[in-house]
């Protein structure tokens, strides 16, 4: 190879490293998980610089199911690349407690000012004290999830509503020590709430739920799974939620056809779970069919009071939209084979929701 050819090859290599590689990495990196991105940082100094030059890659911290998550989070938020972080997920992460969240408050508060989504699902060592510490740093938080936290109480929710004014998505599923006081706080402070999950929050009564239904009229998703104590007095007020699209009432043992009549006024419903709503009959389901004509998902699993009549009504009004229908255990429905259901609902794709 001549000297000129060698220079040309070196120039092509330089251009490749300087221009082509960064362009390729900009495209590829957006498709990688955060953990893969962090691994790539170690490949070479040039790649390290290239990846760090794209701030949009470092808007999320994902520590789901990881060990030493508390220490990892503190370390990550100490790095300049995470100074504008928007999402943090610690779902079922290990070794994170109130102490770590208090360290974040004292040392990393500036990096959390723009945080919009915080997932603390399954982080059972976190108490009201930790909730106070972390929420005090996140004034722009919109999404907050603390599924399966049995240490959180009404005091923690009081800190949340005080510190975070813009919550639109709230998951309190499995927080068994929350009472009507928490829902009163949520209703008073989050009138623009769009999604609420209070699955298995067993201390909540009709009174607390009604506060939500009266004041949070923007709700699009409401999950009341495994809450058997509510009555039609509360269920009737679901009719106030004109924007509601998804409603989970699995196990609502006191829900009657009268309650379903009111729920049928939510004409934008596309997903309705009535699994084990044992008092429901054809009358209530027919009301849903006639009003909620955009329904895509419906579970009637385990309801013995419904018959083929309700399926005929559903087919008449919703045959073009329903893609998921579970009628397993509905002994009053005789035509419930896959073939029978497909004749009524040609777009059906899923026949079983519960196993």
Image: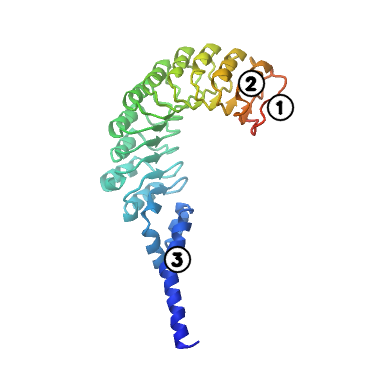
Quarter of the image holding residue 278? top right
Quarter of the image holding residue 42? bottom left
Distance from label 1 to label 3 (Cα)? 55 Å
Question: On the image, numbered disc 3 is attached to which residue?
Answer: 21
Question: On the image, numbered disc 2 is attached to which residue?
Answer: 316
Residue at position x 68%, y 25% from top? 344
Q: Can you give x and y, in whole percent of width and height, for residue 142 in the image?
A: 36, 36
Residue 186, compared with residue 20, is above or below; it is: above
Distance from label 3 to label 2 (Cα)? 57 Å
Q: Quadrant of the C terminus?
A: top right
Check if mark 3's residue and mark 2's residue have beta carbons within 8 Å.
no
Mark sitting earlier along the chain (3/2): 3
Question: On the image, numbered disc 1 is attached to which residue?
Answer: 343
Is residue 43 among what the camera can see? no
Mark sitting earlier along the chain (1/2): 2
Q: Secondary structure at mark 1?
A: helix
Q: Can you give x and y, in whole percent of width and height, for residue 248 in the image?
A: 51, 25
Residue 318, compared with residue 50, is above or below; it is: above
Q: Secondary structure at mark 3?
A: helix
Q: Can you give x and y, in whole percent of width and height, for residue 195 in the image?
A: 43, 30
Residue at position x 48%, y 24% from top? 224
Residue at position x 54%, y 16% from top? 253
Total tally of numbered discs in the picture:
3
Q: Residues within 10 Å of mark 2 (few under 14, many from 20)?
A: some
């Amino acid at each position: 190879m001549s000297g000129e050819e060698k220079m040309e090859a070196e120039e092509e290599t330089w251009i490749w490293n300087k221009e082509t590689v960064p362009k390729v990495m900009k495209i590829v990196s957006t498709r990688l998980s955060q953990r893969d991105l962090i691994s790539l940082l170690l490949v070479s100094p040039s790649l390290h610089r290239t990846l760090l030059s794209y701030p949009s890659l470092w808007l999320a911290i994902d520590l789901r199911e990881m060990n030493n998550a508390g220490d990892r989070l503190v370390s990550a938020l100490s790095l300049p690349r995470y100074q504008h972080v928007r999402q943090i997920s610690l779902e079922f992460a290990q070794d994170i407690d109130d102490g770590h969240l208090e360290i974040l408050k004292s040392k990393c508060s500036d990096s959390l000012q723009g945080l919009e989504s915080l997932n603390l699902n399954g982080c059972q060592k976190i108490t009201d004290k930790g909730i106070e510490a972390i929420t005090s740093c996140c004034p722009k938080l919109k999404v907050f999830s603390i599924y399966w936290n049995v240490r959180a109480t009404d005091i923690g929710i009081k800190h949340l509503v005080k510190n975070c004014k813009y919550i639109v998505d709230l998951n309190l599923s499995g927080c068994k020590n929350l009472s009507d006081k928490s829902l009163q706080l949520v209703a008073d402070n989050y009138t623009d709430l769009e999604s609420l999950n209070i699955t298995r929050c067993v201390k909540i009564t009709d009174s607390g739920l009604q506060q939500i239904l009266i004041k949070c009229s923007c709700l699009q998703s409401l999950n009341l799974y495994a809450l058997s104590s509510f009555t039609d007095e509360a269920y009737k007020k679901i009719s106030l939620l004109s924007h509601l699209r998804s409603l989970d009432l699995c196990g609502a043992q006191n829900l009657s056809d009268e309650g379903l009549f009111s729920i049928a006024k939510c004409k934008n419903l596309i997903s309705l779970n009535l699994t084990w709503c044992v008092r429901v009959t054809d009358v209530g389901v027919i009301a849903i069919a006639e009003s909620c004509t955009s329904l895509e998902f419906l579970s009637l699993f385990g309801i013995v009071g419904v018959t083929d009549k309700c399926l005929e009504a559903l087919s008449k009004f919703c045959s073009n939209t329903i893609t998921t229908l579970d009628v397993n255990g509905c002994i009053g429905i005789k035509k419930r084979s896959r073939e029978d259901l497909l004749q009524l609902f040609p777009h059906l794709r899923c026949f079983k929701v519960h196993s």
